[in-house]
Image (cartoon, rainbow, N blue to C red):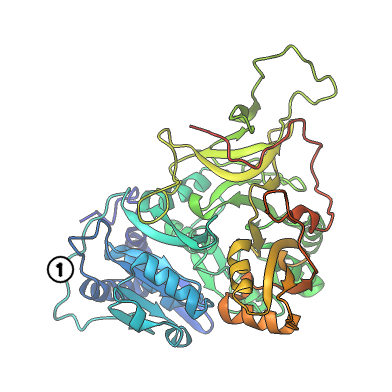
Amino acid sequence: MQDAADSSAPNLADRLHRTAATDGDRAALHWRDRTLSWSELDAAVTATARALTLAAPPSPRDAHPPRVAIALGNTPDFVVSYLAALRAGLVAVPVNPGFTSRELRHVLTDSGAAVLVCAADVRDRVPVGELPALAAVHTVPPTTDGADDPAEFPARAGDDLAVLLYTSGTEGRPKGAMLSHRALAANHEQVGRITPPVVGPDDTVLLALPLFHAYGLNSGLGAVVHHGATGVLVDELGSTGALAEIARHRVSVLVGVPSMFLTWADADRAGAAALASVRVAVCGAAPLPPAVAGRFTEVTGHPVHVGYGLTETAPVLTSTLVDGEPRPGSIGRPLPGVELRLVGADGADLWRDGVPVAEEDADELHLADDPSGSDPGQIVVRGDNLFAGYWPDGRDGPDADGWWATGDIAYADADGDLYLVDRLGELILVNGFNVYPHEVELVLEAHPGVAESAVLGVPHPRTGETVRAYVVRAAGSTVTEEELLGHCARNLARFKCPTAVEFVDQLPHSAIGKVRKTELRPATAVPSPAPRTEISTEVPDVH
């Protein structure tokens, strides 16, 4: 069994045990009117880990440990279930509790989850009879009476699978990103090399981001456990953005998304008083409007630092904290330990290790260009925090040299700060959650009143983007916007649902029949310099 006192142990549950041994009486979690000490949390995790070990014994036919799905809100039950799965040597599968029955079926079937710990209302949506691998469903973390408890838990190596996080893929169906124990720990170590420290044992961290999402799970909860800090669980932000909880527990580290910072910035005097204890504010998951960042700084006196990452990178890749001074629109610089390249459509490097890559063919001079910046290129990364590919066979993961293409386009300025320009493909980010139009289009076109549809993201002041649908009615159909929105609500999680439906006589098509979505998209300004090279929508070869 791995030594829990070993500070290099990658399993977060071992970090929990170490903190409980040295600071057991200190608060680990606050939730509503309840506080759990590190000792209490550690004991609860062990009791549930024992029950999970009995409920989900490994199968010799399975290459991976049994999977434990967790569909809960931001409560102590989620934290206990998650860390217990890791302690038991099982694989945790965090699931959005807002998923519809259709979406739950896909994740539970695809992952082959043997146990589900979920809220009572989620249990009512689980098609248990259609899930032969699912052996047990619990609405609270299970425990045992101790009579048949295993004497110890199986040791897991750093490269062993720890978490499956489902993220929408280009196929339009969520697919599981395989994150190892080492990948989760590596991201904390990378962030931990930033000076001054982002999170330390004396900090109190706001845990209001959904814990089923990589950002909330590892950048929030994972950071609290890794550093032995204190977390404030918030399962309902409310109209004030949980300012009362922030003030009550003297939160020192805010980890949020743009819509949260907009709420806090608009709170004016009340916000300034509630946020008086904050020393670090970090925003990620979606672009932060500079005006919102400016208002927050006016109210609190603190800048908002911006980070960039993906589920597949556990999740942080870059941050303005690296340089210490956020610049409007910038996603900062790569974390220590993260290698990042900008790659052109021809596969050639445009920028690497903080400097532009000189072109081999210098016959043609571009005198009007800034030679110290870079052209836009696809972000390609390498680091210990990268995932091992998609479940179950590791497909589409890093290449043989460890590099992985993110599908995002960015450029670097003369100082080495990075700026996102666009995304390859059609991914929509709603409050940081991935929405692929094809999945929404499949649902719309399953309605008998719809002949064809096209879905795209449009800017939204609170959520970054929102989903808009363009629909061609079936012949003779009189289907209304209200009916289609209701149809989507029954078949899609709330964040994936269109907020508006526009009916059109026909959709614009290319010569090969593909819908030309650029002709539907409203014209919007992109805060970036004119690119000097054309960026293809094809993923370049980075091998």
Dot 1 crowding, Cα within 10 Å, few <14, some 14–19, many 20+: few
Callout 1, which amino acid?
Answer: Ala
Residue shown at the point (39%, 85%) measured from the top left? 139
Residue 40, placed above or below residue 191 = below
| Quadrant the N terminus occupies | bottom left
Residue shown at the point (43%, 42%) measured from the top left? 384
User: Which quarter of the figure has residue 78?
Assistant: bottom left
Where residue 107 sits in the image (x, y, percent)? 43, 69
Query: Is residue 25 in sight in this rendering?
Result: no
In the current view of this chain or complex, which residue is farthest to the top? Answer: 363
Query: Is residue 281 rendered to the left or right of residue 414?
Result: left
Query: Is residue 419 in sight in this rendering?
Result: yes
Where residue 242 sits in the image (x, y, percent)? 65, 76
Where residue 329 sits in the image (x, y, percent)? 75, 48
Residue 95, placed above or below residue 127 = above
User: Which quarter of the figure has residue 261?
Assistant: bottom right
The local secondary structure at tag 1 comes to loop
Query: Is residue 444 rendered to the left or right of residue 134?
Result: right
Where residue 350 sits in the image (x, y, percent)? 65, 28
Query: Is residue 476 rendered to the left or right of residue 124?
Result: right
User: Which quarter of the figure has residue 344?
Assistant: top right
Q: Nearer the viewer, residue 392 or 273?
A: 392
Q: Nearer the viewer, residue 284 or 20?
A: 284
Q: Which residue is mark 1?
A: 151
Q: Nearer the viewer, residue 431 or 354?
A: 431
Residue shown at the point (51%, 43%) measured from the top left? 193
The total of numbered circles placed on residues is 1
